[in-house]
Image (cartoon, rainbow, N blue to C red):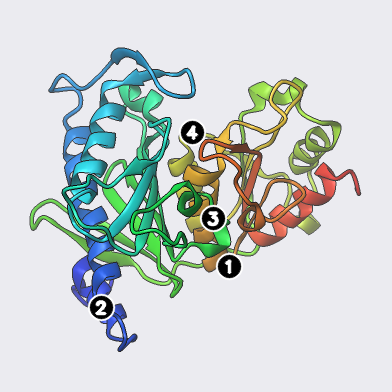
Amino acid sequence: MSDRLVTIERHIMETQRQYPEATGEFSALVYDIAFAAKVIGREVNKAGLVDVLGYTGSQNVHGEEVRKLDEFADSIMFRAMDHTGRLCVMASEEQEDIIPIPEKYGCGHYVLTYDPLDGSSNIDANVSIGTIFSIYRKVSSGERGTLEDCLQKGSAQVAAGYVVYGASTMMVFSTGNGVHGFTYDPSVGEFLLSHSHIQIPQRGRIYSTNEGNYQRWSEGTRKYIAYLKESDKASNRPYSARYIGSLVADFHRNLLYGGIFLYPGDKESPRGKLRLVYEANPLAFLVEHAGGYASDGNTRILDLKPRDIHERTPLIIGSREDVREAEEFIQEKR
């Protein structure tokens, strides 16, 4: 915990003062997201006590059964953002199309894309889950946002972050000026700065991947995992396997301790499982601002241009040296 008692609002305002031309619109948007996270976190923390567990009986755009908490979190994100006048358009992993701002509300200069509740399949087992988000500037010429605004490269993000709902609720985000973590203190109802200027180690000793897919992986990927398991004191191997199956939780651990997370493409799903817009891009933005790296095995994630708001991508993310090494195996250079 920081020696200073810094709330997330104070941190946002202090950062804003570094930019005399700032209007406050962007700062308020980040705080709106923090507010939505408080509401979602409240429901997640009492999930076993209220009727939010289980399925709704419908499917989302990906053909997946929609859980009640997914639907609730998606609704909260929309309702916290639609009326503020700070956004021109939104896109959610749970919605088939982009989400326009209702005509009765004004439009702003920013775009929000989000995964309202990543890892929600784990909620019944009380495993950490999270919310992931990205913010872009509007690039379309009309008054209201369009699909074009939601299909920008990850390198165009002006902010990104996630909220992990676990033993404590923690919001981690970056506006391009370092990666900072805020832990929610329910006794005062505020996110307080607990992790300032997070830096991921250049190399870790943890790998995170679903080895149940091993037989479907490419030869290069299988060789890389076998390499991590070999004993070699000179290169600090073997690595330890740590896999939760909740992307936010796996990424959060590796961001703090170092290591590598892999969800590669395979024979059945060459493009992988994770969504470029809602998952890979925001986490890639964060990891790079913390000194790490993210790749699809061949290309830097932040350089990929999405063609669809639900496009999938392989994701290899974490400590820079580990990800670079994984790329060499995947490209079969080693």
Q: Amino acid at mark 3?
A: Gln
* In this rendering, the label closer to the viewer, 1 or 4: 1
Which class describes the residues within 10 Å of circle 3: few (<14), some (14-19), or many (20+)?
many
* In this rendering, the label closer to the viewer, 2 or 1: 2
Residue 296 position within the rendered picture, expressed as x and y whole percent measured from the top left: 69, 46
Residue 332 position within the rendered picture, expressed as x and y whole percent measured from the top left: 89, 43
**Is residue 7 in view?**
no
Disc 2 and disc 1 in contact, CB within 8 angstroms: no
In space, the residues marked 2 and 1 are separated at their CA atoms by 29 Å
Which class describes the residues within 10 Å of circle 2: few (<14), some (14-19), or many (20+)?
few
Name the residue beneath numbered marker 2. Answer: 23
Name the residue beneath numbered marker 4. Answer: 244
In space, the residues marked 3 and 2 are separated at their CA atoms by 23 Å
Looking at the picture, tell me which residue is in the foreground, 278 or 260: 278
Name the residue beneath numbered marker 3. Answer: 152
Choose the circle earlier in sequence order: 3 or 4. 3
In space, the residues marked 3 and 4 are separated at their CA atoms by 30 Å
Name the residue beneath numbered marker 1. Answer: 291
The residue most toward the bottom is 20
* In this rendering, the label closer to the viewer, 3 or 4: 3
Q: Is residue 188 left or right of residue 78?
A: left
Residue 56 position within the rendered picture, expressed as x and y whole percent measured from the top left: 28, 15
Choose the circle earlier in sequence order: 4 or 2. 2
Choose the circle earlier in sequence order: 3 or 2. 2
- Residue at (29% x, 62% y) in the render: 108
Looking at the picture, tell me which residue is in the foreground, 146 or 193: 146
Disc 1 and disc 4 in contact, CB within 8 angstroms: no
Whether 215 is drawn above or below 170: the answer is: above
Q: Secondary structure at mark 2?
A: loop
